[in-house]
Each structure stands twice: as structure tokens, then as C-alpha cells.
Amino acid sequence: MPHFVAERIASSQATIPSIVRDSAAAYGDKTFVVDSTGQVLTFARNYRRANRFANALLAEGIGKGNVVGVFSPNSFDFITAGYGILASGAVFTPFNSSYKQRELVHQISYSGASVVFAERSLMPRLLECRDKIQDCRLIELEPGFWEPFPGIDPAVELDREADLVFLPYSSGTTGFSKGIELTHANLVAAIRQLLFSRNAMYESEGQTYVFLPLYHIYGFNVVMNVLLAAGGAMHLRARFDMDDCLDSIERERITSLPLVPPVLLGMLARDDLARRDLSSLRWINIGAAPVPVPAVRRFVEISGIPVRQGYGMTETAGIATSNPLGADWDIAETAGTPMMGMEAAIFDLELGERKLPDGETGELALRGPNIMRGYHKAPAENAKALRGGWFYTGDIGRIDELGRVHLVDRKREMIKYKGFQVLPAELESVILELREVRDVAVVGLRDQHGAESPKAYVMLHPDQTLTAEAIQRHVKSQVAGYKQVREVEFVPSIPRSPAGKILRRLL
């Protein structure tokens, strides 16, 4: 399908429902999604199902002004509900399918959801919350709800610039998650950046293996919505299985594989990685969490497949920077340059008022058409994050002379050791240079006097041995004295969110 078709579908005035409609007209009965059983959802069927869902909602009096939740793992029905909610003019708030009662009650209460659709196996978790969410209607997510209704466009007017339409919640690694308000204009800006800029990360007519949760901005907008506009096929899985992933790449000739860091580390632990036929892959995209440079280099060395890093947040509709195709630099070392229409700057860590020159480290700030409207019902958070036309990301980094962004760590995860700033990600990268180490997390532990010092939680590869002293010797040989790891603990696994972010609060 010619490039201009995708450009027409994802025009600068598009909305997500218009992309669903126009992709159906352009690609028809071509496969949009195929699941693990071989069932196929075509572009045309996706459009009809979404409209049926939207018309069913409107018949129930649910539309503009309503927040509608979906609590489900990856499935055709999740896709139908999500696109149907957006077509109805209501606000779509997806739930992490691993949420328990406390997390569900928080998101329902703060989002103001009046109805939540739940996949059958997950409904009991919602019912446990019944006494705390009495104003919220619970409906089983199953085709009987929408099938009786017509598959035609609902009579709804959408304001792509002003309407709040997508309300995902951040992973909440340091406490309760925050709702992030996104418009159609935000979502479409990111889709266009991913399709048409020099940093474009997807091609039309491709075959993409997708296990990323669609409730997360990475799976929903960076992958699924981009493939929807481009006409690519998505091989969808409800959960990740390494054997199925590698087998599918070989069998289906997968061309694109969006990953999170733990999966890349898991691939490196495979004895058979070098023997697998990964030749159909044009590249691997990796994002959602920092990835250790040694791991990327090791994977490229073994597989020969380029690994493209991108950087984005839910607050940026999923994308902010990426490495362009054919970059003449080591793409493992940088998050790349800003996407089309995006600007990046570094501000001082103390007050965030002084813009720093190239090469200096501070807080990364962004501005562009895909920046969120704001945090939901959080004026104090918005006052800190949205200042002077910039979105302050909370990430520490620097910008070099070529305009490339280099991420160092999260500002709020920085460890203060005797007044010195210690960045966990730097120490994690150093420890991962040891081939015995599969995964690692560094956190700041406080003593009885409140002083912080770095502690490393280390997960080894199977059948590997390593002493704490050996790890500490290696770190000592690589970084300054104040950055030394003061304690090492070996653990069977490192807790991470579904997006791959280390859950330091659990350590």
C-alpha cells in the first residue's frame, strides 16, 4: 500500500475513530489482528465492531461526558471496546489487567468511571470492590452487548483538540498512579511522528509480534494505532511466552518486534538465541524503561539484528525521541533525537528555571503537539510538571552537540550519598557488564540516621555463580568512590511493571 494512503488516513486533522474508518476503507478484508489461535480481525470487521460497540453505549445513554473503563487482557474484545468507546465520544480509561482491589478502586474513583467492562475471568476482582464503587456500573465484556446494534458511524461530533478522550493511568512506581489526559490531537500527533518523520519506527505491510499490554500507551498508541493507520498486521498475544515469540518470528516471518528491557534480557539468557532464524526482523524496537547499553550490544553481537531505542511517556502519547534509520552513531548509547514537531531542553535540577547548554546534565523538558493536556484532577502536579510551555519529565539527562538525548535516570530515584548524587541506572549498567548477571536493580537504603547508600539487588543467569565481593570490585573499578555499591543481595527475580520499569518501592 503506497505511503500516501497511510498519510491520508493519519492526516493532521484525523481522530482515532476516523483512522479506524479510513483504514477499513483502504485495507478492507486485509488482516489487522491475528491471535494465538489463528482467528483473524480484519480492518473492515474492526470498524464495524467498534461502531456497534459505540452505538450500544449511546443506546444506554453513555457518551460524551462519561468515563468508561475496560478491564481485560489483550483480546479482540478489548480492541473493539477501546475503539468503540472513542467512537461514542466517551472517555476511554483502560485498566492494568493485573490490578487488585486497591488499585481498581483508586482508578475508578479518581477517573470518575461510570461504567467498567470486564473480561469474564476478571469480573470477580471488580465484584470484590462493589461496596466501594457503588456508583459504577459493571458489565461483562462479551459480544452480546454490542452485536445487536448497527455497524454504522454513530452520530457524534468530536473535537479533536479539546475533548478528553483517553485517560490511561501511569504505572505508579512510587505510589498511586496518576490519570493522564490525552486528546485525539495528542494521540494522532504521536502516530504521525511514528509513521512519517525521519525517526519513523514502523513500515506498512509489516508483520508485528505484539505481547505488550494494550492498556499501556506503548501497546495502544505506539504500536496498535500506528499499525492501524499503516495497514500492518499485528500478531497479538495476551501474555509473553519466549518460545512462542521465537517460533512465531521464524514461522510468520515477523518483521518488527517491539520489546521492553526484561524481554531482551530474557532473550540473552537463551542458549539457542544464536541458532534461531531471526533474519526476517528488520529491527527490534525497545522502550518503556531504560535499557542497559551492555545488554543491547550483546544482543546485536549475537543476533545481528539492529536494536532501535526510543523514549516516550504516557504524558507524551507514547513517544518523544527516537534514533533515525541509518543513524551514523551507536544507537545503543542514546535515546535519539526529538520526533517531528518536538523540542527538548535540559533545565537545572534545583529550580528548573535555567536552561543548560549542550553536554550538561539536568532535568529533561519537552514540548510539542503530543504533550498531554495535564494530570487528571491534580492541579499541584500540573503546576510542577507544566511550566512555561514545557513539560518537565522528571528524567535526568543531557543533550549533546548533535541534538541527541542521553537519559541518565529518574530525578525522583536519585540517591543522595553524603551529599553526592548517585544515579541507580548508571550502577545497574555497570553491574550488567558482568556476564553472570541477568538483571539488577539499585536502590537507596536509609540507615537509622536517615543517610542513603546504594544497594544492589542482583539476579543471576541460571547455573551461574558470583560473589558480592566480585560485583563490588567491578563497580569500584568503573566509577568514582562515592558511587560504590555498599551492599549486594542476590534475588530470584527483579520486580518490574508490565512496561518493564523496576518497581523500586517493592525492594
Image: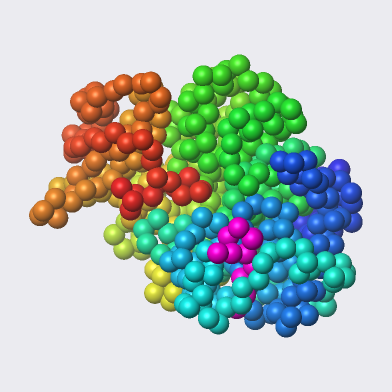
Residue under the image location 66 percent in, 24 percent down: 278
Spot occupied by residue 253 in the image (x, y as percentages of width and height): 74, 29
Side of 202 where 484 appears, left or right: left
Q: Nearer the viewer, residue 223 or 419?
A: 223
Q: Quadrant of residue 284?
A: top right
Magenta stretch in the rendered image: 114-124
Spot occupied by residue 243 in the image (x, y as percentages of width and height): 61, 30
Image quadrant where one finds the N terminus: top right
Side of 174 where 81 appears, left or right: right
Residue under the image location 38 percent in, 21 percent down: 463
Using the image, determine if residue 428 lies above or below residue 418: above
Side of 136 where 90 appears, left or right: right
Residue under the image location 68 percent in, 74 percent down: 90
Q: Quadrant of residue 240?
A: top right
Spot occupied by residue 414 in the image (x, y as percentages of width and height): 30, 50
The answer to whether residue 496 is seen in the rendering is yes
Q: How many marks?
A: 0
The answer to whether residue 426 is seen in the rendering is no
Q: Nearer the viewer, residue 130 or 75?
A: 130
Q: Quadrant of residue 412?
A: bottom left
Q: Nearer the viewer, residue 73 or 363?
A: 73
Residue under the image location 76 percent in, 44 percent down: 34
Spot occupied by residue 308 in the image (x, y as percentages of width and height): 58, 36
Residue 123 included in the magenta stretch of the image: yes
User: How is the structure coloured here?
Assistant: rainbow
Side of 333 where 225 appears, left or right: right
